[in-house]
Image (tube, rainbow, N blue to C red):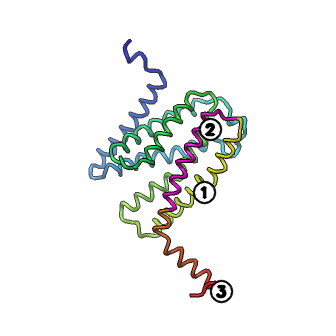
Amino acid sequence: MDWRLELSPATLVKLVSFLYWSAFYLWCSASWPKRSPEWCSRVVTLLHGSVATVVGLCQCGVRSITPWRLTMKISLWHYALMVWSWGYFAFDLIWCLVYWRENTLMLCHHGSALYAITIYMTKDYTGCCFACTLAFMEVTNPLLQTRWFLRDEGYDTTMIYYLVEVAYLVGFLMVRGVLGTWIIYRIVESDLFDMDEKVISIVFYLVSMAFIKDIFGYIIHKYRSKIVRGLQKLLGRSGYFVK
């Protein structure tokens, strides 16, 4: 049998999405030939992260999340968001394999995302759940990319860079660490989700914890002296610190 006849509609639309993101990356490379491959990849990631956050939150209906909403039938717009994100993660996974071969954690993150979206696309009621998951995963991504662009342009000693970095670090720890811990607890104890959805959620949570470990290491490395000086001043003014 001809292999072309075995391609399902889902496979075709995912392929189109992957080609879209690849074409956008190639367009960035052609439009800014003096920029590095990572710069072009960051532009692609910034676009996906920004749109995924806004659209995901709108589709999630974060103000009115109910058991009924989480189990409602998937809509065409939910499915379109899944396909759109699947193509991005497939593109970025290949990009990381080519340029970031040593970044195992990022490869695990993208591989898990591709597997999760593939599973979500086979179900009839996971649209809202996927939209919420994608939005919370990507909500701090625009800050991360903005931070990188500021550093790449030489603004890493400015106040705006410091504010963006602190906003990203605090936001990531709060969303993935605090809120993520509460969400994973509710998912695991709930009867609304299948076992494969619970496993996917646990995998994403473990990946998030690995990112948080790296973030804590970065904070300690970069801000330890500032934190110590701040505590010394605070305790000194309170009368509890003796130099």
Q: Position of residue 175 (x, y in %)?
A: 60, 53
Q: Which mark is residue 198?
A: 2
Q: Is residue 177 magenta?
A: no
Q: Which is closer to the viewer, label 1 or label 3? A: 3
Total label count?
Answer: 3
Q: Position of residue 134 (x, y in %)?
A: 56, 43
Q: Position of residue 101 (x, y in %)?
A: 35, 46
Query: Mark 3 = which residue?
Result: 239
Q: Nearer the viewer, residue 131 or 178?
A: 178
Q: CA distance from mark 1 to mark 3?
A: 32 Å
Query: Mark 1 = which residue?
Result: 174
Amino acid type indicated by mark 2: Lys
Q: Which is closer to the viewer, label 1 or label 2? A: 2
Q: Residue at x 55, y 43 (%)?
A: 203
Q: Give the quarter of the figure containing the C terminus.
A: bottom right
Amino acid type indicated by mark 3: Gly
